């Protein structure tokens, strides 16, 4: 963890290869100092069929899932930095956004914890 899941229209991949997008999000997340580099996970889901405001408008939305314990200010800064990077990469995409959800330590489990 953390997990950064990027949902986007398929046309986003005409501008940059998936690997470039993943690397850029990873780099920004790491630069915040909130996460160990080896823990950051980034995935991309390009959609062929979608609707944005009942229109076929290009979009990118990042869903971040992180362990609880960061301040609201830290999370807001993380969102702003990632959205800023995406706007820099994709200046013509009108819908770029991000939200962050916290994992509860009490209910989180992974293989290493077994």
Image (spheres, rainbow, N blue to C red):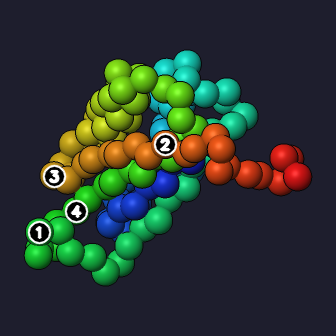
Disc 2 + disc 4, Cβ < 8 Å: no
- Residue drawn at (25%, 49%), measured in percent from left and top? 96
Q: State how far apart marks 1 and 2 are (Cα).
A: 27 Å
Residue bearing the label numbered 4: 58
Nearer the camera: disc 1 or disc 3: 1
Of residues 9 and 106, the one nearer the viewer is 106
State whether residue 14 appears in this view: no
What percent of the width, then of the height, locates residue 72? 36, 26
Residue bearing the label numbered 2: 102
State whether residue 87 appears in this view: yes
Residue 53's tag is 1
Q: State how far apart marks 2 and 4 are (Cα).
A: 27 Å
Residue bearing the label numbered 3: 94
Of residues 69 and 78, the one nearer the viewer is 69
What percent of the width, then of the height, locates residue 104? 57, 44
Mark 2: secondary structure: strand
Instruction: Please give left or right for residue 15 compared with residue 94 in the image.
Output: right
Which of disc 2 and disc 3 is earlier in sequence?
3
Mark 4: secondary structure: loop
Which of disc 3 and disc 1 is earlier in sequence?
1
Q: Is residue 54 above or below residue 25?
A: below
Q: Is residue 71 above or below residue 46?
A: above
Mark 1 nearby-residue class (10 Å; few <14, some 14–19, many ≥20) = few
């Amino acid at each position: 963890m953390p997990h950064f899941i990027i949902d986007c229209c398929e046309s986003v991949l005409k501008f940059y290869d998936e690997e470039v997008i993943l690397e850029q999000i990873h780099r920004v997340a790491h630069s915040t100092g909130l996460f160990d580099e080896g823990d950051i996970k980034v995935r991309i889901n390009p959609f062929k069929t979608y609707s944005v405001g009942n229109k076929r408008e290009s979009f990118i939305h990042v869903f971040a899932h992180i362990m609880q314990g960061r301040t609201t200010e830290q999370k807001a800064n993380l969102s702003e930095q990632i959205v800023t990077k995406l706007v820099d990469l994709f200046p013509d995409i009108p819908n770029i956004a991000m939200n962050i959800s916290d994992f509860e330590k009490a209910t989180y489990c992974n293989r290493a914890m077994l």
